[in-house]
Image (cartoon, grey):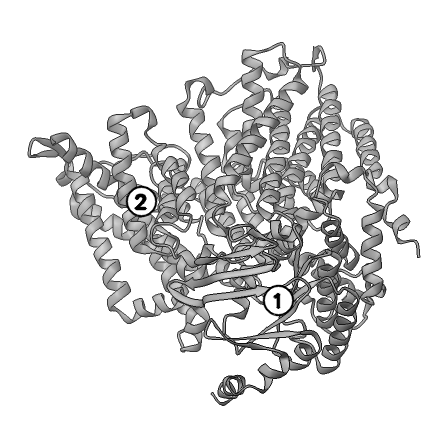
Amino acid sequence: MNLIARYSPTATKLGLPLVAGFAVVAVLVPVFYGGSPLFTWTTAAAWVLFAMATSVMFGWTGLLSFGQAAFFGVGAYAMALLNTHVPDMPGLVMLAVGAGAAGLLAALFALFALRTSGAEFAILTLVLAQVLWLLTYRVPGLKGEDGFHGLFAIKIWNEPLTSDLELWYYTIAVVGVCCWLLWLLYRSTAGMAMRAVRDDPWRAAALGINVRRVQVGAFGVSAAFSAVAGALVAQGQGVVGPSTLAFSISGEVLVACLIGGMSRFAGPMLGAVVLIWVQTLLSNVFHDSNVFVGLLLLVIVIALPKGLVSLPDKVRGVRRRWSGSPPPPSGPASAERPSSDGPIPAESVR
Amino acid sequence: MNDLIAVLVAGVAQGVPVFVVASGLTLIYGVLHVLNFAHGSFFLIGALIVTTTLQGPSLGAFLGSILLAGVGVMAIGVLSEVLVFRPLYKAGSTVSFLGAFALFLALLGLATLVWGTNPRTVAYPSALDGSFSIGGARVGQYDLALVAVGVVIAAGLWLLLTKTSLGTRVRAVSHDRTMALALGIRAGQVSTIVFGIGAFLAGVAGALIAPVSSIDEGLALSSDYMLPAFIAIIVGGLGSVPGALIAAIALGILESLSFRIAPSLSGFSYYLVVAAFLMFRPQGLLGSAARSTAMAR
Amino acid sequence: MSALVVLDQVTKAYQGVPAVRCVDLEVERGERLAIIGPNGAGKSTLFGMIAGEHRPTSGSVWFDGKDVTSQRSSRRATSGMSRTFQVARLVSTMTVRENLFLAALTGQRRGVRFWDAFAKRADVWADADAAMVDAGLAGDADTVAGSLAQGARKTLEMAMAIVQRPRLLLLDEPTAGMGYEDARTATAQLKRLLDVRRDMTIILTAHDMEVIHSVAERVVLMANGETVLEGTPHEVAEHATTKALYLGQGDS
């Protein structure tokens, strides 16, 4: 019985397929797309990272935030401010600074906000994003509605990016590296601890996992990578304004996570690509993204009332129906777990 | 001294709409355990209805508009409860929160489709447009009217919750839903009614601030009303209407004071208060302490 | 202080209503103690205070000579307490093997780290696999814990508690919710295990007299949040107070 060897195939563990996948996409997309569609792909790539970062908190750790825009925006504004005040700083350093700032802000926020549970935490995340949004109007250095321009001039290595193609390669490379880091996190014991905290905080604590520390850490990591995504989007568009902190952004990233499904590592990536493309293609129909995102989220939530939790069960149920094999003798045991989320058996929903 | 009276009245007047919104939010949370983010949209729609229905400067017309706003938003609220929250109730709080957030975005978007994005304004009713002096302090008539309205609504809610059979049922469901069901209380019906009341209050609050504020989509999460309302229900203790009342009025006065003393800090006093509360009393002013004892740590 | 666990005048009240009142208790190293009592006697609350899920309203909890009254439960777990729950709690989306891995990680006194994504951790996996084979769960190695049957859930939870290499093992109703056959098998397994690990101190709560008789050396009877009686399993079981309490409850 060689269980150990089976469980540590180094290739999957280090995420080589993931990196290879990014490399293939990076090469293939410019072959088929150019101009404005290529730019949509670039935006989608940044959103892939944003969705993955959100999934660290929401999907892996089970913390729901309605204020992810806060960290997305912090990344974008950090980029803009650094570009204004220290224009010679390399772009990658700016990314790192923004990520660090957002991570620290998030960890500090989480230290306070996690003293409450559930509902209050949800409110506080929303409030945080909205306060930052306000700050852009109140603090003169943040330039209010006008925002910042001229982010195209940011130097990567020593040169600014000059074409859509360069921007694409740059964005996909940064996103690929970040996703790879997140993959490592997912596979590490820290990542396992996050999932344990999500599944059952009491069990996690009894296993010796410091629940609060894991939650604060997950929040910080999630924020840091969200900030990188925000900075990438800002750099691509060349402008940063209060709209990067709008609550519709927080809603959109949740939609991306939910469309893709968070029970698989790569689910949110897929969701982000789908979201950005659908949004771009429908931009003539929906001028206001709130209606679009809101209705989409409503449909997802109502069609899958147990949300992510039910997704694997549902898929299994569908497959079972297709293959015609009998259902298992008893419902999933999660139905018997006395959780605060209502003791309704998963299978009883439709 | 004169200053103090003016500051107090302004603070309470600022707190009243916040209380009216917050009381609905906290009632709904108590009964349904749903955090209704969509309240922000309800609030905005209440104000927008006034911009459309208000005919002329008379006080009667204004009161009529307020009522229309309340009833209109109540209809939206009841529909939302039946169509969105009822199917989600059993799915747990995370899904309900997501549903509420989705509803918030969708209604906000729909409201801007209907009314457009240009800021609108409403004139004060002529009878309340002005100010007079109390002991030398200039006090706005509309501010005083708001204070009066606040007293009326607080008293009305108190009567409703403590003196009527509906109030008894609401308190029973909010205390222990399972037990209430066992006692034969139709919790579903109570939920719908409470959601309707909460939405009505949000619509009225939106209508009340229509003359005071510029009305655009920013109102849905405005730092003057909605964010303080969310903070008031945390500080007051989720589910507690008296807690929301105390917190909303206290925050209004605090904000009004800080505007007078340190204008640069105004708008941020709320957040300092909430941070302090999280440090020392995470369960809120009137929240129960039992909730916080058994936490996985 | 030589006792492993000391409860000193421990009280826990919920909104002013005491669930546990001024309990004094000492548990020696290597001792096997059962806490019994009718529903609502305060057993679970007392358990929660030892494990760290509840903080006492007053009084103090000592573990291994240290005051742990306000220590978080995860800290207590890493310093040598492990526990099972009345209704088994597992990491439901992970496989049986991964659940045991997390427990074995604590058993080796290692924390969770980001950078160990590169580490093999073969010794931890070996521990987990050994525990899995011991518990008879090898056939379910890659089954997601959330889809196990009730009996297997309890078995897995027990295996996790043991591979954590605790000095103090807390078992909350180890046979609750099991059918008769499963309960007998579980009791036999437990007994075999305890004979091997003489050094492990155990506190369990139980309704099932058979578990108590085969595992416990000393029994404490609780009623209305207070300890009312203690002695050997036989003494307590035969005592009039016990009979009155249990029969009284049966009548109502």
Left or right placement of residue A98 versus residue A183 in this view: left
Q: Which mark is residue B179?
A: none
Mark-to-mark CA distance, 1 and 2: 38 Å
Q: Chain of mark 2?
A: B
Q: What amino acid type should be assigned to the residue bearing mark 2?
A: Val
Picture coordinates of residue A51, whole percent (x, y) = 65, 39
Instruction: Count the numbered circles shown.
Output: 2
**Vertically, is B162 above or below B57?**
below
Circle 1 packing at 10 Å, graded few (<14), some (14-19), many (20+), is some
The image quadrant where one finds the N terminus of chain A is bottom right
Foreground mark, 1 or 2?
Answer: 2
The image quadrant where one finds the C terminus of chain A is bottom right
Regarding residue B251, the answer to whether it shows in the image is: yes
**Secondary structure type for disc 2:** helix
Q: Which mark is residue A349?
A: 1
**Secondary structure type for disc 1:** loop
Picture coordinates of residue A310, whole percent (x, y) = 66, 59
Q: Which mark is residue B18?
A: 2
Circle 2 packing at 10 Å, graded few (<14), some (14-19), many (20+), is many
Q: Residue furthest front?
A: C1
Picture coordinates of residue A7, whole percent (x, y) = 85, 49
**Disc 1 + disc 2, Cβ < 8 Å:** no
Residue displayed at 18% across by 38% down: B9
**Vertically, is C65 above or below A326?**
above
Residue displayed at 75% across by 39% down: A183
Q: What amino acid type should be assigned to the residue bearing mark 1?
A: Val
Q: Chain of mark 1?
A: A
Left or right placement of residue A233 versus residue C181 in this view: left
**Vertically, is C247 above or below A214?**
below
Residue displayed at 61% across by 33% down: A226
Picture coordinates of residue C161, whole percent (x, y) = 71, 60
